[in-house]
Image (spheres, rainbow, N blue to C red):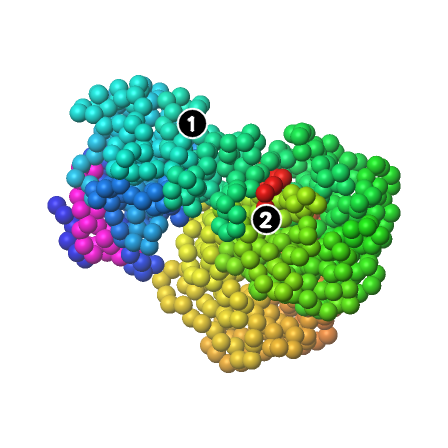
Amino acid sequence: MPLAPGTQLGPYEISAPLGAGGMGEVYRARDTRLRREVAVKVLPHAFSSDPERLRRFEQEARTASALNHPNILAIYDVGKHDGSPYLVSEFLEGKTLREQLKAGPLPVRRATDIAVQVARGIAAAHEKGIIHRDLKPANLFLTSNGRVKILDFGLAKLFQRDDPGVGETLSLTPLPHTESGLVLGTVGYMSPEQVRGESADPRSDIFALGAILYEMLSGKRAFHKESSAETMTAILKEEPPGLSGETRKIPSAVERIVFHCLEKNPAERFESARDLAFDLESLSGISSPSTARPASTLSPWRKWLILPVALLLLAIGLAGGRFLARSTGSSAFPTFQQLTFKRGILYSARFAPDGKTVIYSASWDGQAPGLYSTQQDSPESRPLELNNSILLAVSPSAELAISRGCNYLFLGECSGILARVPLSGGAPRDMIERVNSADWSADGSQLAVTRQTASKFRVEFPAGKMLHETADRWLRSVRISPHGDAVAFSEHLVWQGDSGNIVVLDRDGKQIARSEFYWTLEGLVWSPQGDEVWFLASKNQQFANELHGLRLSGKDRLILRFPGVVRLHDVSRGGHLLLSTEVWGEQVFFRGPGDQEERDLSWLDGSTVTDISSDGENVAISEEGEATHNTFFAYMRKKDGSPAVKLGTWGRPVFSRDAKSVLVISGDGDRLMLLPTGVGEPHELNPSSILRFASAGWRPDGKGILFAGNDGRGWRIYTQDLAGGNPRPITPLLTVHPERYESNLLSLDGKYVVARSAEGNPMLYPVAGESPRPVPGMDPGDVWINWSLDGHSGYIFRWAEVPARVFRLDLSNGSKQLITELLPSDRVGVTAIITVRMTPDGKSYAYTCERGLSELFLVDGVK
């Protein structure tokens, strides 16, 4: 019997029926706990009468719920009502692709956009070891805001009939019936191997997506006969008709991709859904056959992250050449040649004086950073005997400027001692400390550098002569113009951040040009003619994806747009570019009592753990990556890995003692808020006179909070009653490092606060106002994690150290006891451990690691 409006299924209140099918009834409902609309599918009673089927259903539902991707339907919950199991998913508004196709074929641009989104979604699932097996238009939902959602992901293999070799699928959309076919899948979209009853793998999903793309472009199914048996025979033996005809012209590059997906032999299809997405993205601007370029398969991308981030390159007709869709300028496509083929992060790359040899620094396969050389016509790289060093520049006389010691600053960025060493060999000669970028003049006689002094950041040209200095902007990526009469560099708003402007100065320090503000800047070079500064940037994404040219007049032009993340390294006299494709992100790992190994609790692509509840059952995660579109999201996630609960568009959540709320800070750092973790209303805090907030936490009594605040004169630690009133300063003016996410600063007895002095030294400040004293045994580079349960010691770690050593610090005498060393089992590309959280009893911990993967390319044809 259908459920009436108002019926309660646990916390879900039925609003209205949406439809029914052979596999159950779908309802619109209200989640009364989180106050959001959801879809509830009540499954047939037969599921509850078969314990093994119910067990498999619950197990696979949990698997599907772990698939968090914008193009996959989110499954929130599973339960039982009157003996019948039900699924709870996000509520969607729109229509299925099957319904859309009733109106006929889609425009090429729209069809390829849908296919790209589907490819991204299934790629993310494949990386989790999950194959859909039943992709078809009815399982693709087109939302009203243009998003594509894959339905039934991870559930297809559950719903098998009792007949051997026969299966059917469940849809969360109200369908009148579900087609069935041999083994598992839907007739017309099954791969040849599925038709033959063989095991499906990710390439089976690629075949199905090819059939769907064919149908979107032609308006007809790729394999459709009078009967299921004839359809399956066509899948095994026949090729679909060509897509282009007298009435419809399909770009040849698009047609090639479709038929590459539909190869009978799985080994001849795309290697992965991610490769398919790359190719389709690169063709996103195609509108007619005359602009098309032939496409072929990219080499497999062995990716570590769950992040669906494109690496962007599509092969074209020339052997080894690759292109990107050009958004402005000449119609000729630039070509791309891959130069590196190992897993790890690349720090920098430069052309040698011969213009053919490339020198670069990288950390491959989890090893320490080192220098390598490679030739454009060789896939091999030769290591140079310069370990734990980063390349900064190569002079015309083949002398290297290197940074000895990689003191971590930022993804792909280090600082160290500037040294000079001949490329031919010899011992480095040290010159200047704390240098993070350098460049040689065209005649090799002078160096320009960006470096940090005790309290300021400087551009020096020549090295030793201050050209530009600032106390509140981070400077990097310095380059000297070909004529030696100007320098360009990037100026960033936040220390160890990449938002800012490109600045060009003459030799007297006078500003020649300044770009507009960019959300991210990743490398710059002077054009070969010296009339422009080329740089990689983005105005609205977390990482750089556009190549711009800044003229000395200040005019900015867009040269190329990339569908992925890119960093610019160098340009040759002939106009060849060195750029790297990048996959960057943060991951959260957790381990509790009794766990045999760490559990990955990352949620999106920029997961940072900011707290663990006092009982060790939940972690608080701040998301601030590409997926959140440059804002902060606060999440709570259980230690068992069940789906994260989004608490709000705020960052750096810290649990109250009872874990019923979290204290959060706005993305701009100018507001404080209390968000409930369950039932309740958000409550904004407005401490008077405080302009900026950081390092927030709770008082042990639960009646007040603690935070680092800036009133315009500097940072202090304040306490604030939740009931209201003005914040009370605990410390004098001091230096705080918000980027290190220090929290839980107040001792469990409420008597002491750990904070940094104006000189950056860790201090114990008595809340009662007595004189502070240094934290014994804690160095300026150590990061405070938490007070221990005994109240007389705390946990610390060394920021950015890999692996990160966690110590219990005795505050009475400064003695340290090593508790654990933190490093993911796959350390490839791990650049730093940036946050660590631990319960006061020391039994549970979580940490955040930053990871990057790079591939270096030689680019020709950019103008």
Q: CA distance from mark 1 to mark 2?
A: 34 Å
Above or below 822: residue 463: below
Q: At which x and y percent is residue 212?
A: 31, 35
Q: What's under tag 1, amino acid-wise?
A: Arg
Out of 139 and 458, give the one closest to the viewer: 458
Q: At which x and y percent is residue 472?
A: 67, 68
Q: Which residue is mark 1?
A: 269
Q: At which x and y percent is residue 395?
A: 79, 46
Say what secondary structure mark 2 lies in. loop
Q: Residue at x 68, y 43 (%)?
A: 574
Residue 9 on the magenta span: yes
Classify residue 591 as left or right of residue 281: right
Out of 476 and 658, give the one closest to the viewer: 476
Above or below 264: residue 749: below
Label located before the other in sequence (1 or 2) = 1
Residue 204 on the magenta span: no
Classify residue 669 as left or right of residue 681: right
Classify residue 523 as left or right of residue 308: right
Q: Which residue is mark 2?
A: 863
Secondary structure that dominates the magenta span: strand
- In the displayed orientation, state which residue is furthest to the left: 1
Q: Are marks 1 and 2 in contact (CB under 8 Å)?
A: no
Which segment did they paint magenta?
A: 7-31
Q: Residue at x 46, y 52 (%)?
A: 627
Say what secondary structure mark 1 lies in. loop
Q: In which quadrant of the rendered view does residue 379 lie?
A: top right
